[in-house]
Image: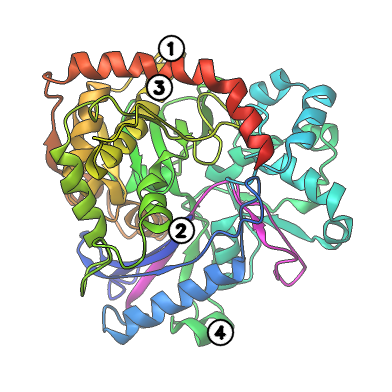
Amino acid sequence: MNMSKNVLLGIDIGTSSCKVAAFSLVGETLGTAAWPYEIMRNTAYEAEQDAEEWWQAVCFCLQDLLGKGAFQPQDVAAIGVVGHSWATLPVDEQGNPLRNAMLWLDRRSLPECRYLAQAVGEEYMLELSGNRIDPAYCVPKMHWIRNNEPHVYAQAHKFLQSNSFIVHKLTGVFTQDASQGYGYYVFDTDRRNWSEAACERMAIAHELLPEVYESVEVVGEVTSRAASVTGLAAGTPVVAGGVDCAGACLGAGLIEHGATQEQAGQAGGMTIVTDRPYKDSRLISGCHVIDQCWHLSGGTVSGGVLNWFHGSILAAGSDLSPLGDGEQQPFERLSLEAEMSSAGAGGLLFLPYMAGERTPIWDPQARGVFMGLSYEKTRGDVVRSMMEGAAFALKHNLTVAGEAGIMPAGLISVGGGAKSRVWCQIKADVTQLPLGIPSIEDGTVFGAAVLGGIGVNAFSDWQKALKEMVAVKQWYQPSGTNTEVYDELYQIYLKSYAVLKDRLHQLASMG
């Protein structure tokens, strides 16, 4: 590698915003920029985004960083892109979107799931891809588009996901990385490639799927056209990139069997690094962004509950509106109020199924529930109950992972929620596992940058370099004083869903 090129760029296409960051080869953050975008919902079952807004956000962030002098274009050694999983985006031969991307939150393809269960079978899906049949995944969405928008399906040249769309915008190359392959049932997780037999069995034209690359492979270079709108230097190498949860694991230094990331972003859950595929229908199995590694994940919708509470329930002029600088200020204040509430939130329980729920209950018709509301409850109690509900969802997934054969000894938290002291302590107390905060806060976008560095051999020994760059700056140990309260409340949490399930489905049908 040209040693004068000493900057790595990471791009993270998150569910609610894009983040771009520049790093030195020793992990120093040179600059970060972020730009939000909306999720479009016409019904409770729909969740879409305009992929061109992802690209506009990337361009804005890059121009912002360049304007601030965070890096010089000619100094960039490589670019890595990670993104949210299971976005289903048909594009034409030029890579132009033919419709909005259907997100992992989109649940419209329930009829297609029933068809696949009958025509192909759950066991076949699980054996090949390591995953169950659910509307969150890509193949049911592809079938939905073919059934409901046949003109779009007929024009489709390729189906892309969030990071591969940005990679195409940068390079003009259509790609599919191995770590995002688990979104498709026609992906053989053991072999880390497409299965033509599965494509035929599920009536998916193989030519609609881009060539598979490992996440660290250089797939192309920044084109002159992309350079003109981003400010990047033409010819800059771009790697395939990968799914955000696996990128966050890499960015947190989690590359060994059993190492576990706790996702404290818009999508909650956990990701456990494994040395082989673990396949359990209650969880999510996929390939790590590092070759010869896999992951077993739990994905929930609980991570965004405070965003919902602040944005949709609290009035815009309330005492929690941002005052001056600092977008995190309202959430810091909510955390302080939650800290004033006691463990168990005074007997208030929250089921965090705000958009149905993924693992481990896989119920698109589940809905959020507050139980135990009374006049003396404070806003702090409500916020704490939401934090505790997300922690119970995490514990549920970890318990199932243990039943599947792997149980972590500790957690490393990545995402905006990791900044909340009270939320981190709640998660440690509920799971009875130590929870660490890594020294590099922007772990997901840092992981994307590291992928680029590995791809162009920027490190003489990347595993050693990663250990030197990433450390745990703070540990939250289970306190023990709240164990009895949380154990009792967790059992109520599990039983409440079981009892309310049918009623939640009735309510969902009315929405």
Q: Secondary structure at mark 3?
A: helix
Of callouts 3 and 1, the N-terminal one: 3
Q: Amino acid at mark 1?
A: Glu
Question: Mark 4 and mark 3: span between their CA atoms?
Answer: 49 Å
Image quarter (top left, top right, bottom left or bottom right) of the N terminus? bottom left
Q: Which quadrant: the C terminus? A: top right
Identify the amino acid type marked 3: His
Where is residue 206? Give x, y as percent: 79, 46
Marks 2/4: CA distance? 29 Å
Front position in the image: 105 or 194: 105
Residue contact between numbered discs 1 and 2, judged by CB atoms under 8 Å: no
Earlier-in-chain disc, 3 versus 2:
2
Picture disc at residue 16: 2
Nearest to viewer (mark 4 / mark 1): 1
Q: Which residue is mark 4?
A: 224
Q: For the residues marked 3 and 1, what is the alpha-carbon distance in whole angstroms?
A: 11 Å
Region of the chain picked out in magenta, as a range: 75-103
Give x and y (percent) for residue 408.
Answer: 30, 23
- Circle 4: residue type: Ser
Q: Which residue is mark 1?
A: 403
